[in-house]
Image (tube, helix red, strand yellow):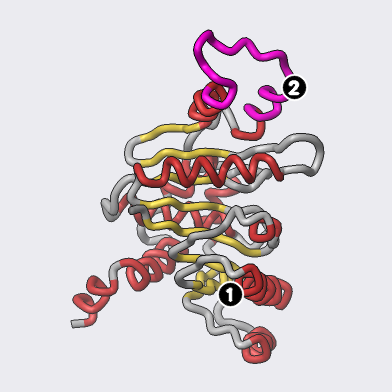
């Protein structure tokens, strides 16, 4: 049985960076094999992980529907599609990545979302962890791309809009009765301390952050220079914050030993 982690929040909150650092944590701590899912049509998880994507689910589906298929003898259309979709997996040691990419037609990602749900269900049993980087906003929830999740990481940047987006996502999760075992709220890109106005907004919304991630100049430099965030040093402020969070969420006994 795999453990599933999904990352959600508004655009610009740093979801992909958080997802990348969570994956880095799992690999560095030898937590088992990982299936990373870039479910954002504006795909950039691969770049953060230092991987090269040659094929995406969306592109395969576009080609599958738009061209006359030359299906091998004795193979059904469904079996051939499944075979083609397996080509969308980018493999590396201990980590495989599947990227959704563009869907069918402008602004439409409905069919890829349906397919990616089935792919995750079929493939997840082969991995210890599934980490999904979702698209900005709440569309992935209404399409039920994010469901049956063990840990939902709700990421807000240091803004009122980010906090309100997190609150709306929480409401939608409850409204749709999605199977989410635990929600953890992360305030990302925090300067020296959280602004009092944000504390007031959190009190109003009933939000209690599980963790904060400080502004990290080193991470920003890696991003500008297009270096994989996976290669950030352990001294990175963002790495330290994410590692401490994941210790608490996944290895509470490790935290207790440290305290002892």
Identify the residue shown where x is 59% and y is 62%.
8
Q: Secondary structure at mark 1?
A: loop
User: Few, some or many C-alpha atoms within 10 Å of disc 2 (few <14, some 14-19, many ≥20)?
Assistant: few
Q: Position of residue 200 (x, y in %)?
A: 66, 91
Q: Position of residue 213 (x, y in %)?
A: 51, 70
Q: Is residue 75 magenta?
A: yes
Q: What kind of element bears circle 2?
A: helix
Tell me which segment is drawn in magenta: 60-79
Left or right of residue 183, residue 189 in this image: right
Q: Is residue 217 above or below residue 203?
A: above
Instruction: Locate residue 43, reporting x and y percent.
Output: 62, 42
- Which residue carries the number 2 mark? 66
Is tag 2's residue or tag 1's residue first in the polypeptide sequence? 2
**With respect to residue 225, does 201 lie above or below?**
below
Q: Which mark is residue 103?
A: none
Observer able to see residue 157? no
164 vs 260, nearest the viewer: 164
- Relative to the observer, which residue lies in front, 92 or 171? 171
Residue drawn 48% across the image and 32% down it: 89
Q: Which mark is residue 191?
A: 1
68 or 235: nearer the viewer: 68
- Mark nearer the viewer, 2 or 1: 2
């Amino acid at each position: 049985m795999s453990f599933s982690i999904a990352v959600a929040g508004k655009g610009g909150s740093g979801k992909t960076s958080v997802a990348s650092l969570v994956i880095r944590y799992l690999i560095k701590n030898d937590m088992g094999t990982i299936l990373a899912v870039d479910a954002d049509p504006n795909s950039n998880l691969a770049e953060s992980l230092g991987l090269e994507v040659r094929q995406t689910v969306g592109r395969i589906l576009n080609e599958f529907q738009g061209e006359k298929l030359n299906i091998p003898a004795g193979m059904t259309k469904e079996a051939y599609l499944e075979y083609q979709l397996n080509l969308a997996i980018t493999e590396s040691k201990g980590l495989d990545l599947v990227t959704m990419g563009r869907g069918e037609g402008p602004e439409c990602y409905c069919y890829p979302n349906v397919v990616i749900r089935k792919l995750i269900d079929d493939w997840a049993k082969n991995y210890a962890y599934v980490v999904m980087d979702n698209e900005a906003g709440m569309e992935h929830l209404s399409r039920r791309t994010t469901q049956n999740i063990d840990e939902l990481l709700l990421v807000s940047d240091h803004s009122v809009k980010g906090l309100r987006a997190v609150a709306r996502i929480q409401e939608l999760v409850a409204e749709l009765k999605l199977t989410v075992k635990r929600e953890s709220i992360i305030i990302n890109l925090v300067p020296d301390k959280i602004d009092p106005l944000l504390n007031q907004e959190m009190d109003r919304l009933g939000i209690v952050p599980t963790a904060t991630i400080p502004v990290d100049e080193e991470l920003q430099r890696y991003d500008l220079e297009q270096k994989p965030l996976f290669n950030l040093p352990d001294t990175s402020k963002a790495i330290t914050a994410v590692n401490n969070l994941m210790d608490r969420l996944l290895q509470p006994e490790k935290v207790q030993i440290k305290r002892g």
